[in-house]
Image: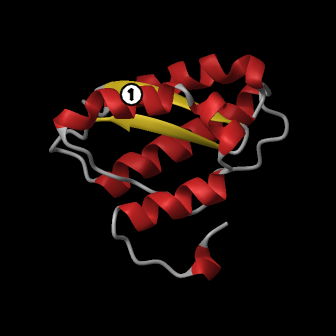
Amino acid sequence: MAEAHCEELYKYIWGIVKNKKCKLYRINGIEDHIHIFSDLHPSISLADYIRDIKSSSSIWMKSSNLFPEFRGWQESYGTFTYSIKERDTVLNYVKNQKVHHKNEIFYDEYRRLLIENGIEFDEKYLL
């Protein structure tokens, strides 16, 4: 992902989140993925929320020419829920993505999160 334009992308996604009546707490990422920490308004399903973020941001990224290497988001996504008691931990986790991923690559992180959250998965479907 073109680091120089990530802030513009994050602001664009924030607009999508806001239009869905959801609240964005934090967004951040690295070259191959982003993390969005938000609430989910009861009027929208999670699948519709993710679909709208991915499709709208994909169109914007391709038409803006700010991300020339971007070909599209992957088909799948991962979502996790957290209690209000964990809010600060999650905020800091998302805020510090660049530092975090110097120590743990995406594949290892995603696999660890699935295991920690008791989610069954098939290794062949992981990136």
Residue 109: % across, % down: 57, 54
Q: Position of residue 60 (x, y in %)?
A: 63, 32
On screen, 75 above or below 62? below
In-image side of 40 versus 12 (left or right): left
> In the rendered image, which quarter is residue 66 located in?
top right
- Give the residue at mark 1: 91
Residue 108 place in picture, x, y as percent = 62, 58
Q: Residue 14 vs residue 85: left or right?
A: right
Position in image of residue 16 (x %, y %) = 42, 30
Along the viewing direction, whichever of 88 and 37 lies nearer the viewer:
88
Find the residue positioned furthest to the left: 42
Identity of the residue drawn at 42% across and 49% down: 50
Quarter where residue 65 is shown: top right
Label 1 environment density (alpha carbons within 10 Å; few <14, some 14–19, many ≥20): some
Residue 22 seen anywhere in this rendered image of the structure: no
Q: Amino acid at mark 1?
A: Leu
